[in-house]
Amino acid sequence: MKNTAHPHGLNSIAFLVLILFFSCEAKPPPGMTDPGELTYYGFVSKKANCARCHGRDGSGSYDGPDIRGSIEKFGRDRVRDFILNGKDADEDDGMPALRDELSDEQVEKVITFIARWPAPDSSKIRKRKNKHDRRRESP
Ligand code: HEC
C-alpha cells in the first residue's frame, strides 16, 4: 500500500495495527474453556497468540507456517522447545521465544491443543501460503 499523502504512513499503520491488536482483546467466547485453546487464541497472553501467526485452524498465515501435523513431525519435545525458546528467533521471520508468556502447564496444554490438527493431505494443498512454507518444503 502506498500512502504518499502521509509522511508518517508507516507510523499510522503501526498505530492502526496496535489499535486492532488491543481491540481484539476480548473475553473468550462462551464455551471456550480448554486451557490449551484459550492459550492458542491469545486469551492467556497477547504475545503468545499462536492463532495470530498460525491461523485460527493452524493452517498458517503470512506471519507463520502451517503447524498442522507438527507434533507428529517434530515431537512434543521439539515443539515445546520452539514455544519456549522460539524458532529462528533471531531472524526477522522467525518465531519469538514465549517462555516469559506462558506457564509450563499452559505450554503443555497448548501443545495438546494443536496436536488435534493432523497434517493436511498434501494432495489438497493448491498453493503455498508464504515464505515459511516455501522454506519448509525445500530439501
Ligand atoms: C509472532 C508470530 C508467532 C507466534 C505468536 C507464534 N508463532 Fe509459532 N512460528 C512462527 C514462525 C514464523 C515459525 C517458523 C519459524 C522458522 O522456521 O523460521 C513458527 C514455527 C512454529 C512451529 C514449528 C512449525 C514449523 O514447521 O516450523 C510450531 C509447532 C509453532 N510455531 C507453534 C506455535 C505455538 C503453539 C504458538 C503459541 C504458543 C506459536 N507458535 C506462536 C511464528 C509465531
Image (tube, grey):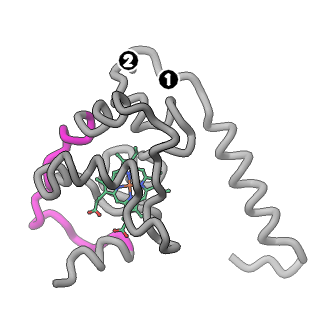
User: Is 32 left or right of 101, judged from the image as shown?
Assistant: left
For the C terminus, the image quarter is: bottom left
**Residue shown at 11% from the left, 51% from the top:** 72
**Image vertical order of residue 69 relative to residue 110, above or below:** below
**Residue shown at 30% from the left, 30% from the top:** 109
Q: Of the residues under marks 2 and 1, which one precedes in the sequence?
A: 1
SS class, disc 2: loop
Asked whether 115 falls inside the magenta stretch, the response is yes
**Residue shown at 81% from the left, 62% from the top:** 12
Q: Residue furthest bottom?
A: 139
Viewer-nearest residue: 117 or 106: 106
Mark 2 vs mark 1, CA separation in Å: 8 Å
SS class, disc 1: loop
Asked whether 35 falls inside the magenta stretch, the response is no
Find out if the beta carbon at label 2 lies less than 8 Å from the nearest ligand 1 atom.
Answer: no
For the N terminus, the image quarter is: bottom right
Viewer-nearest residue: 7 or 108: 108
Residue 100: percent from left, percent from top = 51, 42
**Res. 15 image quadrant:** bottom right
Do the residues bearing badges 2 and 1 touch, measured as CB atoms within 8 Å?
Answer: yes
Residue 83: percent from left, percent from top = 37, 49
**Residue shown at 37% from the left, 63% from the top:** 87
What is the number of the mark on residue 37? Answer: none
- For disc 1, the neighbor class at 10 Å (few under 14, some 14 to 19, many from 20) is some
Viewer-nearest residue: 78 or 116: 78
Ligand 1 positioned in quadrant: bottom left
What is the number of the mark on residue 28? Answer: 1
User: Is 102 left or right of 70, judged from the image as shown?
Assistant: right
User: Is 116 left or right of 90, judged from the image as shown?
Assistant: left
Residue 5: percent from left, percent from top = 89, 77
Q: Which residues are magenta?
A: 113-130
Q: Which residue is mark 2?
A: 33
